[in-house]
Image (tube, rainbow, N blue to C red):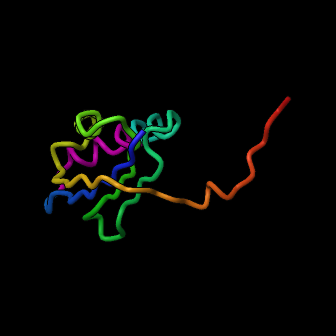
Amino acid sequence: MNSYMIDVDLAERLDEEFFRLIPYQRNYIRRMMKKGVISNYSFSNDRGKLWVIVHAGSLTEVKHIIGSFPIFNYMRFQIHYLLFHETNDALKPQLWLN
């Protein structure tokens, strides 16, 4: 599994349709996070940028994931293939229930 950072610029003018899509976007992201496909999702305070860490087998798969974003039509993005992506989650002890 490869890791990719998606650097997203949102449209400068966001209309009512964009704001209507936000709950669908958040639900989609939550589902992908539960599946382990997306590990990080960050939104800038000025509401102009998103950063997303996606774990996928190929660039084609990443493009499919991004293309499924409800807000896709409001995005311009760049995909960066990561050599590694570390978080402090790796430092947390895991519980094993036997």
Given residues 25 and 51, the one toward you in this image is 51
Given residues 40 and 48, the one toward you in this image is 40
Given residues 94 and 28, the one toward you in this image is 94
- Judge from the rendering whether residue 39 lies leftward or rightward of residue 80; answer left or right: right
In the rendered image, residue 46, in percent from the top left (x then y), is placed at: 30, 70
- Judge from the rendering whether residue 71 lies leftward or rightward of residue 54; answer left or right: left
In the rendered image, residue 86, in percent from the top left (x then y), is placed at: 51, 59
Residue most extreme to the front? 83
Tag count in the figure? 0
Q: Residue at x 62, y 55 (%)?
A: 89
Residue 69 appears anywhere in the view: no
- Judge from the rendering whether residue 98 lies leftward or rightward of residue 80; answer left or right: right
In the rendered image, residue 30, in percent from the top left (x then y), is placed at: 47, 40
Residue 31 appears anywhere in the view: yes
Which of the 4 image quarters holds residue 10?
bottom left
Residue 53 lies, with reference to residue 72, above or below; the image says below
- Judge from the rendering whether residue 24 lies leftward or rightward of residue 79; answer left or right: right
- Which quadrant: the C terminus? top right
What span is in magenta?
14-26
Task: Give yes or no for residue 19 being in the magenta stretch.
Answer: yes
Q: Residue at x 37, y 38 (%)?
A: 56
In the rendered image, residue 17, in percent from the top left (x then y), is placed at: 20, 43
Residue most extreme to the bottom? 46
Residue most extreme to the right? 98
Q: Residue at x 79, y 37 (%)?
A: 96
